Each structure stands twice: as structure tokens, then as C-alpha cells.
Amino acid sequence: MGECIAAAKLKTFLIAKTGTPDPSYEKSFYGGPLLAQGQCCVITIAKYTKDFIVENMGVPAELITNVYNGTDTAKFKRTPDMAAEALKRYPCATPEKAFVVGCIGSYEERKAQSLLLKAAKKLIDEKTLPNVHCLLVGEGPDKEMLTKLIDELGIKDHVSLCDFTKEPFYVFERCNVVALPSTGKEGLPNVLLEALAMEKPCVATAKYGMPEVVGTFAEYGMTGYTFPSGDVDALAGAIVKIGGVSAEEQAKMAKAGKDMVFAEHDKVKQFEKILEIIKAKAKAAKAS
């Protein structure tokens, strides 16, 4: 597109919006010849994405604006009816006592649900969080492998392996914590924004855009903990840091996450930011 605009000598300003970056991408994906002419810009969904493009694609930082991913916060309203329905849909052996760690995502290697299962085994065996229950929800090629691993670890009573759902609100409502142990490429996963909007603290891999929403933020407080990629012990420790504190402390984390998402990751507000960028670029192009 950039090449066509340049070849036709059009004044069209190109705005490239990008999600999760990939090393196989090329600089031309972000504007091609228009980059040198200052006739294009890039909108990224996370600071991680911006840094990746600058360092790996050679796109000047001044041509990139970060506008965080947004989620439809209006949809995430917790109710007593939702809580009751969540218990029905996702039962476990000891529903009153279980500390439920949810993990929503496709059953594939990069999502690393197996890491969470191994962390649960550690928590049970060491009695640091013996009431942990993993609620896995998704679909994909690794489902059979995960089923076998659950049997091998001997934690069948501590795991629910469930099918994909188009109603994730009930999954979030059922959880005490949401985990994202991904080891493969991610940008700024919507599942984290949705979980935080539903007042659920999170534990996530300290890579990609995940530390930008999971951790401690001066304006809001602690939304959860990150851990090194692939580290079972660290993942188990991160879960304990939430499950091992008082209900009051967990409630503080829940509020911090919700406040942050509603303030900085509301879909409507983020769309308005992008619209303002488009208007500003259009105005500047018209003036020239």
C-alpha cells in the first residue's frame, strides 16, 4: 500500500496499526517508502511492541505512537446471579474451599498450560497451597497431552479441563486468580485485561506486553505478579503470593486491576485516542 501511494504521488497518509510483532515481519510492513517521507506512522498496542519494532525493524521511534489495547469494560459487570451460575458451570471437588486458578487460551505449546499443572503439583505436594484448583478453558491440539499429564501428576481432583466458551465472564467469576504462563509470542493479551476488569488478580510471564498490566503500578497498586518464562517454581511462588494473603489484600489487588483497566484500557477511550491521531494527521496533510 505504501509503495502504491508513493508511486502515484498521492498525499494519502498511511497509519499502520499493529498487534503482536513477529521477527519475520519486514520494515516495509510499517509504511515502506512513506517512512522516509514522513507520510506514515505506526500505532502499537503495547510499549513492548513499539520497542520491538524500533529495535528489530529500524522504524524511527518518533513515527510510533503507543495506544494500549482496550477491552469492552461495559460487559464486565459482576452480579450474584453470575456467581451462582459460574459455580454450576465450573464445579470442583471442594467448591467452598478451593483456590481456583483459571487459565483461558488455546491448548497449544506456546500457551504452556503444562507449566501451570506442574506448579499446582508443587503447591499440593509441598502443602503451600493444597486447596489449589486449576480451571483450564480452551481448545486445541494439546488437549490430549494435558489430559495425560494431569493423570501422570496425580492431580485429577485439582483440575478441570474444559471446552472453549464464548461466555468467559463465568470463567473469570469462578476464579480467584487468572494465570497466563505463555512462553510463546504474545502482545498485550486481552485475557489479562478482561480478567483484571473482572476484579481478578493475575500471574503472568514476565515477557512481551504482560508486565505492562501485571505488577505494581504507582497510580493503582498491585494487580498481580510476573515470573520468569518457563519457571515452574517461580509460577508456584507467584500464585502463593496471592493465595497466601488475606481476603482484604486480595481485594486490594482486585480493585487495583479493575481501576487500571477502566482508566487506561477501556475500548471506547482507546478508539477515541486513535481517532484523534487520524484527525490530526488528516488536518496536517490538508494544511500541506
Image (tube, grey):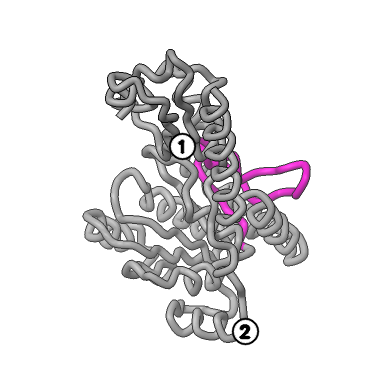
Q: Nearer the viewer, residue 192 or 131?
A: 192
Give amino acid for label 1. Ser
Residue pictured at 62% horizontal, 80% vertical: 79
State the extent of the magenta-drawn residues as a range: 200-227
Residue 46 marker: none
Residue holding disc 2: 80
Residue 168 located within the stretch drawn in magenta: no
Number of marks in picture: 2
Task: Name the quadrant of the N terminus.
Answer: top left
Quick one: label 1, few (<14), some, or many (20+) residues within 10 Å? some
Q: Work out which quarter of the rendered image holds the C terminus and state it.
A: top right
Compared across the picture, whether 154 is left or right of 54 comes to: left
Asked if residue 149 is positioned above or below residue 275 in the image, the reply reads below
**Looking at the image, is 73 positioned above or below residue 187?**
below
Few, some or many C-alpha atoms within 10 Å of disc 2 (few <14, some 14-19, many ≥20)? few
* Residue 163 falls left or right of residue 79: left
Q: Which element type, helix, strand or loop, lies under badge 1?
A: loop
Residue beneath the point at 53% across and 39% down: 278
> Which residue does the numbered mark 1 point to in the structure image?
229
In the rendered view, does 136 fall on the left or right side of 200? left
